[in-house]
Amino acid sequence: MDAAEHSTLTKRQIYDAWWPLAASWLLMGAEMSLVSAAIARLADSTFHLAAFSGIVFPVSLLIEAPIIMMLAASTALSVDREAFRRLKRFASVAGLGLSLVHALVAFTPLYDVLVVPLLEPPVGAIEPGRLGLQLMTPWSWAIADRRFHQGLLIRFGRSKAVGVGTFVRLLVTVSLLAGGIVHGGIPGIAVAASSLSLGVLAEMASARLFSRSVIRGRLAQAPVGEALTLSKFLPFFLPLALTPLLNLLVQPIGSASIARMTMPLENLAAWAPVTGLIFMARSMGIAFNEVVVSLAGRTGARQILGPFAFWVAIGLTSILALISLTPLSALWFEVVTGLDPDLVELARLAVPLGIILPAATVYQSLHTGYLVNAHKTRAVPESVALFLLVTTGCLVLGVNYGEMPGVQTALLSVTAGALVQNLWLWRSQRRLHS
């Protein structure tokens, strides 16, 4: 990129690269909790929460999964204007194609013959789930486009612009959620899905706007590198694309498992608020991945990135422990989220089972970042396949033999899978310098 790449990395440089992305991810984490809080304050909240966490969100995430790592790809490969142009074309085609798949699932009988039998949602959640998916149709295309442009911004040191874009997204989403609550007559799932869709479209527009100065300036001035051909790009990107696809399969598998355990409606309704809180704690650790991707090649990077990751992991896990193991959890689920009393107890008992997930997320980002920076991406989907295998195995045991509530079983399963995934990534990235 420039001479800075050859200088010794400092803690200050890591912090400056990380905190805008961490703030951005934290805002996105808060978004999920705010959506749950809005649904909980509208009519038929239990059915609509179950539809959101059991159908709309997991299916939407699964469809968009192949394009999620466009951020890492753009960060690593947008080295000159020609590479940027080719990556942009790929992101546009892939995003539109995935949105078409989403539309087919949401607007055709595929919903009835595929989604409903596989997930087995409570009857009262089926039609709200259909409406929510329909309103989320632009999601995949908007995600592909904004993550591509955000990768460019990170590549050229404009991480703060990513945080600003996420603030714009949250502002739009919160405004629409508040409007829905004030109106009171719009179905909760419609308020949630339309707010999320319009929010991410606003963030996409923001990322495009901030990217203009980079495209006309530093990108245009960057020396032309080796041509980015499809034969070079696909071996790099396909393992990355497979990674979130395998990872996010856990979402519908988890929902389908909870639906097959005791008290499925109540546990599905509690699942979204619980995962929303845990995702907030994990979010800033997720942001560390792009930091490692962009900085791991610097002199002395490993000696300083590792300790930085350790303290971030300790801090995030401590925050979640403070909330989940004290009366703050009741305050969160009763007052902030607004759950019915019977759901509050389910949620409170479940959250402590995911306490180590924030730390696991930080180290997953660290190890994955090393591998992506070195263009050794094969171990990444391998680790996620192990995560999926372990998590699914635990869920199957829970469905067939367990007596714990579904939301607790799901969290324990995810935690077990995350630990195995981290061990595989740690083992793989050590080979880079062995």
Image (cartoon, grey):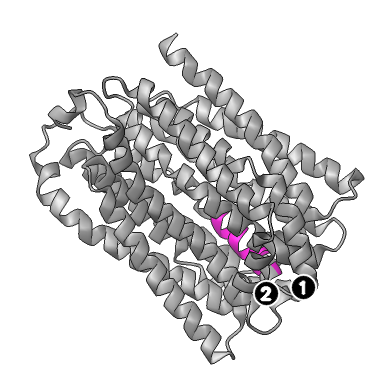
Q: Earlier in the sequence, mark 2 or mark 1?
A: 2
Place of residue 146 in the rendered image (x, y in percent of width and height, measured from the top left) = 34, 56
Does 182 sit above or below residue 224? below
Q: Which residue is mark 2?
A: 48
Density class for disc 1 (Cα within 10 Å; few <14, some 14-19, many ≥20) is: few
Does 209 sit above or below residue 73? below
Picture residue at 45% right of the left edge, 79% below the top: 176
Q: Secondary structure at mark 2?
A: helix
In terms of image quadrants, where is residue 157?
top left
Picture residue at 22% right of the left edge, 45% below the top: 85
As for residue 53 lying within the magenta part, the answer is: yes
Dominant secondary structure of the residues highlighted in magenta in the image: helix
Picture residue at 52% right of the left edge, 66% below the top: 103
- Closer to the camera in the image, 146 or 167: 167
Place of residue 178 in the rendered image (x, y in percent of width and height, measured from the top left) = 49, 81
Residue 253, label in figure: none
Does 366 sit above or below residue 112? above
How many angstroms separate mark 2 from mark 1 (CA)?
Answer: 17 Å
Which portion, as a residue range, is magenta? Answer: 50-62
**From where the camera sits, is residue 381 visible?**
yes
404 with respect to 20 (left or right): right
In terms of image quadrants, where is residue 79?
top left
Q: Amino acid type of disc 1?
A: Pro
**From where the camera sits, is residue 121 visible?**
no
Q: Which residue is mark 1?
A: 341
Q: Which quadrant holds the C terminus?
A: top left
Place of residue 7 in the rendered image (x, y in percent of width and height, measured from the top left) = 19, 24
